[in-house]
Image (cartoon, grey):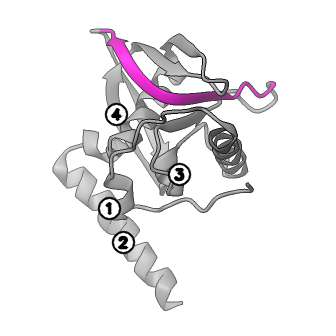
Amino acid sequence: MAELPVIIAPDPRLKKKSARVETVDDSVREKLDAMLETMYARDGIGLAGPQVDIHQALVVCDIAREGESAHPVRLVNPEVVWASDEQATNEEGCLSLPDQYAEVTRPARVRVEYRDETGTAQAMDADGLLATALQHEIDHLFGRLFVDHLSKVKRNMILRRLSKERRQKGAA
């Protein structure tokens, strides 16, 4: 697989809940690799299956900064099993909501359980940017976007802006 097209909001496919992966096989590994390629090509730090029209519980993430070695994480069936009471507010963006950013408050630390690309059960404790990125991407698996954490006014403003841009591109 090569780079995949990213679905842009508002698109109803982004609101669909993802199916759990029963078996981690070569097909799943190919999808994860294509998702990573897509994420890197678009300068993202995370990508979930629904964003590329793969409605399986798949997430990739790499928070390495420019100049640092890549450290990709491939997660199959990830779930947050613990979240801190402490909250953190960070600016979030999304490849499915290009050039749109907003402050989102989420738990500051999380524990995520998942299967890796070999199918082995794993657990990861995360804080800072990684905690935010993992929660953001896992939300996608349940049809939630970062704008769903905003007030209705802010959410609608962002979605209307994206709809307008889509119409203008279609007319061009």
The 10 Å Cα crowd at callout 4, few under 14, some 14 to 19, many 20 or more, is some
Main SS type for the magenta part? strand
**Residue with the mark numbered 1:** 159
Q: Residue 129, how many percent across, how many down?
A: 53, 23
**Residue with the mark numbered 3:** 95
Q: Amino acid at mark 4?
A: Val
Are circles 1 and 4 on residues that touch, CB within 8 Å? no
**Residue with the mark numbered 4:** 104
Q: Amino acid at mark 2?
A: Ser
**Residue with the mark numbered 2:** 163
- Of mark 1 and mark 4, the one earlier in the sequence is 4
Residue appearing at x 52%, y 38% in the figure:
58
Are circles 3 and 4 on residues that touch, CB within 8 Å? no
Q: Secondary structure at mark 3?
A: loop
Query: Considering only vertical position in the picture, is 73 above or below 44?
Result: above
Q: Residue 170, how many percent across, how many down?
A: 48, 85
Are circles 1 and 2 on residues that touch, CB within 8 Å? yes
Q: Amino acid at mark 3?
A: Leu
Q: Residue 54, how many percent across, how many down?
A: 51, 52
The 10 Å Cα crowd at callout 3, few under 14, some 14 to 19, many 20 or more, is many
Comparing 16 with 94, the one in front is 16
